Image (cartoon, rainbow, N blue to C red):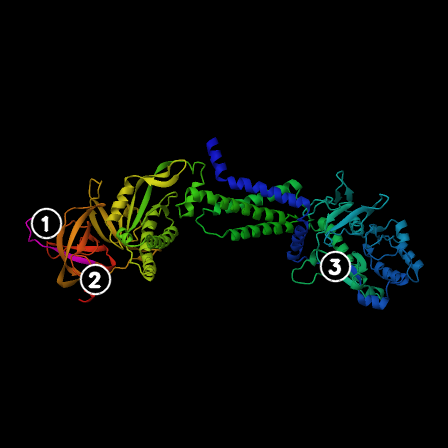
Amino acid sequence: MWNLLKNKIWQWRAVLIAAPSVTAIVLLLRLSGLLQMLELAAFDQLFIRRLPEKPDERIVIVEVDEESITELGHPISDRKLAQILKNISQHQPRAVGLDIYRDIPVGEGYDSLAKVFESMPNLVGVQKLIESADSSAVNPPPVLKKLDRVGANDLPIDGDGKIRRSFFYLSDKKGNSLFSFSFKLAYLYLEDMNIKVDELEDDSIKVGKVIFKPFLGNDGGYIRVSDKGFQVLINYRGDIEKFQRVSISDVFHNRIDENLIRNRIVLIGSTATSLKDIFFTPYSSSLFAIPRRMAGVTIHANAISQILDAELSDRPIIKTPNQLLGWVWVYFWSLLGATLIWLLRSSKIKIIPPFTLFLGGCCLVSISYIAFIYGWWIPVVPPTLGMIGSAIGVTAYLAQNASRIRKTFGRYLNDEVVANLLESREGLKLGGQRRNLTIFTSDLRGFTATSERLPAEEVIKIINLYLGYMADVITEYQGTIDEFMGDGILVLFGAPTARVDDATRAIACAVAMQQAMEPVNQKIKEMGLPKLEMGIGINTGEVVVGNIGSEKRTKYGIVGKQVNLTYRIESYTVGGQIFISESTLKQAEPIVKIIGERQVKPKGVQQPITIYEVGGIAGDYNLYLKQEEEIFVNLSQPIMLEYSVLDGKDISDTLEIGKLIKLSENAAEVYIDVNSDRVISIPQPLTNIKMNLLVSIFDAEKSGDIYAKVLEKPAASKNSFYIRFTNKPPEVEAYLNLTYKSK
């Protein structure tokens, strides 16, 4: 159990480090206040993107607009204001809020106004308690002050100049509490409906069945803002169009519907821009328009509407999770970001990490938006930074680790090898395990002889070009390159990760590699170098796979007789051929096209085996090799030659004499003279031979070394056999091409 746990910790080490570390950094940034403005801006967007709210018909705004100022003057005299209040009162409103300062008489008619103040028990005036650098306190109307029908119209302003909160009550300089203008009007409205408003022991305010908790300085996206008094977040309904409204001029002339005001809350206040009683709100955060401001009376209307809706319409008030839940929320998204990147590193599904993070961000925003609809303000910026930061942290860890891994496993071209070796604490330790793999090996025919005739620099250039193309193909088909051996490649399918289609992919990879020889040879030709041909052998069987070597030098590789058998199978190929074993064919899908089969008895194998020549693969791969028929021409003048049979890397000491009697572009028929005292045996099919042409056109008595493989193609004469050239010196190739084309 403990070992399993340790292994899991090792597997997820980057996530377990990145997620809490980034969370801590993000929380420090948040507590420092650096994220506050960003979070408030995100909060504003929730209001802007929210579906439109229905108008609140319980509130009527009597607006002092620019036209009314022109008609009635400014400030409105006491006499005119008294008439306006009388006209409103006769329509029986539940509550009237006068959001116009009247601390001193204005013009004529103060006595009339005072009498109206005394005669309207549901009238609430305003005073300003809080002084600031650009505004001073304003006293209430003296008459209304004596009658205790005054509310404070102060509104807390955030650091960006926007109003997102309102007061229920606040205290003056003497410590005396005063209801806010909006709360007092809402209280009058609800009192008329016999709905109680109480203060609870924890200082919360209960309105009917709804409990309003006081705003604290670190709620939501705020950090250490003033929470003096009893503040709440305003769940805005919208701008002034969400309320019924009428011009104060129309009210003065009594040009209003008698049902407009009845049983409603009436707010009298300025909406004229010239009076500068306008403020920035969440709706001022439009990205593509000039920020608009909201009249103070409209903000009060929203604050009142929120209180009424909470009790009467079950409209949610804005709540925030406690600080601990906020931290957990940030950690969750940090963990998610780190996990996604960690999982993507070895996933079969190729998804660009930024796109994954984008999808995660969309999920986060969607959750926050839905929560906001139901009255919860869930911060967006800290968890977003946590998710991105953790993803970057894991990415950086993987990048830092990549250097160390590549030093240890520098021969791997498949990134999957690295990822899988890191999945286990034992991944870098010596040892192996038995696995059933498909083993793939390729080799350039006759390249050793070619390399002996070229400068070392040219040989390296050819090898790098060839291996570059082949490595790309192998990686595409998810093969693991185990080793480069000069011009040979050993590839594993099924290690370190086994898949059901390992054998099929190996065959498809072989066909694709043979096709890739065409662009390779095109570049070789441009370099003025001889053409390359490749043979491929594939076998499937049980081997031991793992880390081989010492603590100082480790290699991920395979050991077993099946490896040797694969090399033997490949040795039977000529240029452009692919041979597979019977075990590979059985595990491959039936879409493999077989164009030939033969029995062979490789060295070290007691019984003959059947190998199959691949011509292509159908299905989704749809890859096929070109089947070019060799066209032989009879030579009127046979070309004399001598040859020796190759046994592995050894060349027989016995020289045989023969002659070329037929010739094609890549092959020839060799005839052996029987006029000899000794018995001459025809080389066995698939045998490799070294030969020299005995012609006088070369600088020496005989040509340079030519390598060929004996074909299974039956000859017309028992003294003849067919060969396929595997390597020809340039001068020999030119001579034979000229001879062939002249026929």
Type of residue at label 2?
A: Tyr
Secondary structure category for the residue under label 3: strand
Task: Give the number of marks.
Answer: 3
Q: Nearer the viewer, mark 3 or mark 2?
A: 2
Image spot of residue 182 (x, y percent) = 78, 52
Secondary structure category for the residue under label 2: helix
Circle 2 residues within 10 Å: few <14, some 14–19, many ≥20: few
In this rendering, the answer to whether 662 lies above or below 488 is: below
Circle 3 residues within 10 Å: few <14, some 14–19, many ≥20: many
Left-right relation of 453 to 661: right
Q: Which mark is residue 294?
A: 3
Left-right relation of 188 to 368: right
In this rendering, the answer to whether 293 lies above or below 180 is: below
Residue 101 in which image quadrant: bottom right
**On-image quarter of the C terminus:** bottom left
Q: Which residue is mark 2?
A: 735
Q: Is residue 445 visible?
A: no
Provide the residue span drawn in magenta.
667-678
Image spot of residue 430 (x, y percent) = 39, 35
In this rendering, the answer to whether 75 lies above or below 165 is: below
Query: Between disc 3 and disc 2, whose residue precedes?
Result: 3
Image spot of residue 640 (x, y percent) = 14, 57
The CA distance from mark 2 to mark 1 is 28 Å
Type of residue at label 3?
A: Met
Left-right relation of 556 to 200: left
Q: Which residue is mark 1?
A: 680
Within the magenta stretch, is there residue 492?
A: no
The CA distance from mark 1 to mark 3 is 110 Å
